[in-house]
């Protein structure tokens, strides 16, 4: 139970007893650092009910609490603020309750609760995953894990954009320039090989445009008349008409990409429970349009196209079916959402991890689904995030200037290796242990750097800064975890017994107070879809631990009870660090 919940009824009773009035709400805030106290009651609202000065009121309530509430040790009043000091026994009792609790702060889902489906990644099958996909995957995976820890069943999914003109561009370029090469014959990951042909198409396309412009065509005419784009458009028509050789090539090249993606996902540490493919979903939703027309939700224009008018909601008119009867992306997304609930009937809400350039699209999608009457439509959330920038500028896939996700992960591992070697602390490690540690540190640095930032904000990613072993970084937190593991290994005595200490050192108390916040942080992070809340809680926990580590002796303490408690406290901090980092998809090393 939180301090505010413990204190509220006692303060209400104090006010009633002392002043014979009742107050609607007790306002609490965190005690400011410069004053002693664990929680502060704001006195000012009480002045409307009791004619007195705030200091006198605070003193009377404080004395009442000290005399009548065992958890309250003492107090001080500063202006209109009653700073309440909680007894050490309260924190010791709390710690003894949680010290052996596995996954402290995690809530087990109830069998009958509705599930949440979290969509992330959703790449195109014409290129490898890049830096933008890294942020998307890390956010989606972490939010799914946090929602699960908050007490809900979660399904992780993605929709793969495996059809369209961009796919045909890679296919056509491979036919023209590939000489039959494959991932096996080249030694390249399949997604990289296919991505190379997407770039090759663009290069050939630009050359043909330039040639046509030299022959007197305008740029717009040249873009439309370039032979290679006309061939790609024909290939798309052939695919839609089911031409066997086009379908066979499409399946082959897509499989190359899926095999490549699987390696990237494994290295990144993310996974999925289900996959949806645009080639299977692009016709979904057309039947729903007819239902919407019958209900008067949609309207048909004279040319046969179908629209929804959302101007009363501050949006615009949105097309949901073209005049030739073909679907648009909105139609497909409507159909896919409905299909997902059919596939997983216990789904009661969805989270879409998609960049902020699609904010408007999801406002419209969610509103349409609500108007169509689906009860789960009120539990849809767009996990909108900002782009990841690099010092070198914006990324462009077709020009081959993207930051490849695999290359980035390798660069992070290499950077971690360089810094770790410079620190010179790994002399006793085998080559295999070193390699695993470099990966753990490098990927931990990457993930933490991205996840500690509020999803809505843009990030300027700096690899070297992220691998710093000091400050608000993944390696700094990992190092503290490893330091605690070293303490536990060196503790050559039984520290499983309950300590009988009655007083806490100030640093011990602050550490227990920080641990106590963890369950609430998980719930807040789930509610706000923000891994940044977990990341920054963990950093504060580690800062408190390092302050404690510097201020008190642990293994050198002569009082056995104190030594037992401090090792137990250290171990619990390490457990919570590991659990927090698990929610962020980050591993922690036993040694560093």
Image: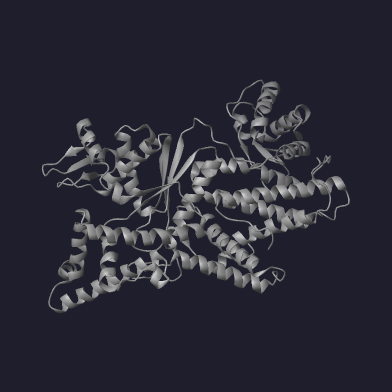
Q: Position of residue 343 (x, y in %)?
A: 38, 38
Which residue occupies the extreme right position in the image?
Answer: 558
The residue located at (20%, 35%) in the rendering is 293
Colour scheme of the rendered structure: one colour
Look at the image and tell me whether residue 125 can be seen: no
Which residue occupies the extreme bottom position in the image?
Answer: 214
Q: Is 111 left, or right, of 312 in this rendering? A: right
Nearest the eye: 327 or 277: 277
The residue located at (68%, 23%) in the rendering is 13
Q: Is 493 left, or right, of 134 in this rendering? A: right
Is 66 situated above or below 552?
A: above
Is 54 situated above or below 209?
A: above
Quadrant housing residue 400:
bottom left
Look at the image and tell me whether residue 55 can be seen: yes
Quadrant (top left/top right/bottom left/bottom right) for the N terminus = top right
Is 546 situated above or below 85?
A: below
Quadrant (top left/top right/bottom left/bottom right) for the C terminus = bottom right
Q: Is 234 left, or right, of 406 in this rendering? A: left
The residue located at (75%, 53%) in the rendering is 548
Quadrant housing residue 197:
bottom left
Q: Is 142 left, or right, of 237 in this rendering? A: right
Q: Position of residue 131 (x, y in %)?
A: 44, 62
Q: Position of residue 162 (x, y in %)?
A: 32, 55
Q: Position of residue 445 (x, y in %)?
A: 57, 62
């Amino acid at each position: 139970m939180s301090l505010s919940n413990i204190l509220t009824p006692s303060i209400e009773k104090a006010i009633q007893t002392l002043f014979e009035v009742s107050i609607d709400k007790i306002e609490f805030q965190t005690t400011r650092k410069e004053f002693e106290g664990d929680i502060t009651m704001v006195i000012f609202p009480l002045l409307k009910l009791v004619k007195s000065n705030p200091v006198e009121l605070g003193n009377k309530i404080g004395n009442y609490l000290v005399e009548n509430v065992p958890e309250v040790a003492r107090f001080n009043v500063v202006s209109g603020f009653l700073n309440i000091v909680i007894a050490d026994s309260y924190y010791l009792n709390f710690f003894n309750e949680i010290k052996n609790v596995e996954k402290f702060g995690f809530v087990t889902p109830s069998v009958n609760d509705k599930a949440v489906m979290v969509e992330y990644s959703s790449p195109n099958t014409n290129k490898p995953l890049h830096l933008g996909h890294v942020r998307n995957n890390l956010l989606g995976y972490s939010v799914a894990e946090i929602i699960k820890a908050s007490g809900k069943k979660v399904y992780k999914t993605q929709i793969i954009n495996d059809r369209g003109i961009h796919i045909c561009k890679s296919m056509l370029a491979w036919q023209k320039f590939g000489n039959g090469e494959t991932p096996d014959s080249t030694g390249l990951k399949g997604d990289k090989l296919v991505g190379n042909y997407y770039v090759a198409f663009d290069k050939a396309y630009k050359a043909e445009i330039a040639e046509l412009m030299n022959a007197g065509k305008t740029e717009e005419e040249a873009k439309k008349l370039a032979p290679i784009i006309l061939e790609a458009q024909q290939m798309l028509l052939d695919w839609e008409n089911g031409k066997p050789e086009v379908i066979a090539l499409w399946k082959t090249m897509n499989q190359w990409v899926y095999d490549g993606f699987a390696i990237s996902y494994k290295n990144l540490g993310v996974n999925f429970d289900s996959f949806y493919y645009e080639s299977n979903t692009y016709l979904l939703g057309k039947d729903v349009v007819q239902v919407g027309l019958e209900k008067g939700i949609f309207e048909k224009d004279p040319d046969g196209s179908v629209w929804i008018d959302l101007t009363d909601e501050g949006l615009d008119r949105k097309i949901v079916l073209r005049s030739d009867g073909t679907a648009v992306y909105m139609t497909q997304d409507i159909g896919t959402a409905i299909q997902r609930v059919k596939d997983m009937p216990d789904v009661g809400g969805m989270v879409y991890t998609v960049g902020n350039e699609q904010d408007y699209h999801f406002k419209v999608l969610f509103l349409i689904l609500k108007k169509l009457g689906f009860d789960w439509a009120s539990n849809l959330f767009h996990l909108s995030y900002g782009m990841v920038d690099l010092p070198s500028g914006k990324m462009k896939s077709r020009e081959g200037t993207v930051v490849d996700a695999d290359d980035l992960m390798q660069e992070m591992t290499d950077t971690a290796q360089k810094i770790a070697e410079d620190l010179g602390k790994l002399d006793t490690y085998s080559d295999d242990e070193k390699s695993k540690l470099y990966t753990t540190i490098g990927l931990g640095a990457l993930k933490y750097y991205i996840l500690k930032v509020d999803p809505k904000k843009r990030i300027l990613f700096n690899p070297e800064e992220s691998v710093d072993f000091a400050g608000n970084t993944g390696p700094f937190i990992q190092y503290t975890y490893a330091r605690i593991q070293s303490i536990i290994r060196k503790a050559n005595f039984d520290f499983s017994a309950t300590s009988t200490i009655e007083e806490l050192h100030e640093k011990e108390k602050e550490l227990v107070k920080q641990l106590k916040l963890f369950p609430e942080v998980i719930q807040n992070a789930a509610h706000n879809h923000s891994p940044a809340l977990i990341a920054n809680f963990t950093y504060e926990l580690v800062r408190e631990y390092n302050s404690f580590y510097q201020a008190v002796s642990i293994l050198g303490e002569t009082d056995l009870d104190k030594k037992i408690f401090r090792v137990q406290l250290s171990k619990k901090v390490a457990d919570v660090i590991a659990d927090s980092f698990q929610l962020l998809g980050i591993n922690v090393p036993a040694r560093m």
